[in-house]
Amino acid sequence: MTRPIVFLIFLLVVSRLDMSHQSNLAQYPVCEPVFEYFPDCLAFLVGFYSVPTKICCRHVEKLNKLAKHGLGPRTICFCIQASVKGTQPRLLASRINSLPIMCHTHLSFPISDSMDCNK
C-alpha cells in the first residue's frame, strides 16, 4: 500500500479523536518517531487489512530498535496509547497478537489502546 493511502486511513482514524486530544499529541515531542512509524500499522490493527503491509513490518523493526536502544518500551507504549486513545475503530487484540508473527519479529513494546505502560 502506498504511503498516501495509509496516511488517509490514519487521518480517518485520527479524525475521530476529540480536538483536545489531537492538540495534546503535539505536547509529546519525544513521541515523534512513534507518531511517524506506528500509523502504518493501524489499517491492519483495526481490521481494514488482513495482513500488515511491508512498511508496517519495517516500522515495527524500527520501533523495536527504539525500544531497545533509544526511547525504551515504556515511552513507546505511552506514545502509542496517546495516539490511539479514543479512536474508532478500536485496535483488535487478535491483530495485535498476530502482528509480530506476520512480521516475523517480536514486539519489544506493548500495543493497546488501554494498557498500563508502567508494567
Image (cartoon, rainbow, N blue to C red):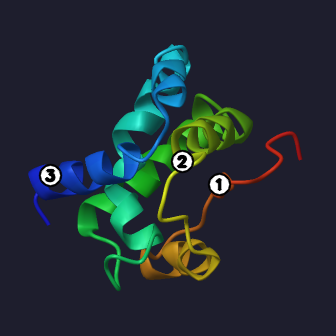
Q: Which of marks 3 and 2 is nearer the N terminus?
A: 3
Judge by depth and name the residue closer to the eye, 17 or 5: 17
Judge by depth and name the residue closer to the eye, 115 or 60: 115
Q: Position of residue 9 (x, y in %)?
A: 25, 57
Q: Is residue 103 above or below residue 107?
A: below
Give the residue type at disc 1.
Asp
What residue does disc 2 label? Answer: 84
Residue at 34% of width from left, 82% of height from top? 51
Please tell me how crowded label 3 is: few (under 14), some (14-19), or many (20+) other residues with Cα within 10 Å: few
Q: Earlier in the sequence, mark 1 or mark 3?
A: 3
Count of marks placed on residues: 3
What residue does disc 1 label? Answer: 113
Circles 2, 1 touching at the beta carbon (< 8 Å): yes
Q: Earlier in the sequence, mark 2 or mark 1?
A: 2
Q: Residue 50 carries which label?
A: none
Residue at 53% of width from left, 72% of height from top? 100
Q: Where is residue 57 in the image (x, y as percent from the top left)?
A: 37, 64
Q: Is residue 83 above or below residue 26?
A: below
> For residue 78, what is the image quadrant?
top right
**SS for tag 2?**
helix
State the CA–CA distance, disc 1 to disc 3: 23 Å
Judge left or right: residue 28 versus residue 52. right
What residue does disc 3 label? Answer: 3
Give the residue type at disc 2.
Val
Residue at 35% of width from left, 43% of height from top? 15
**Position of the N terminus by quadrant:** bottom left
Q: Is residue 75 above or below residue 52?
A: above
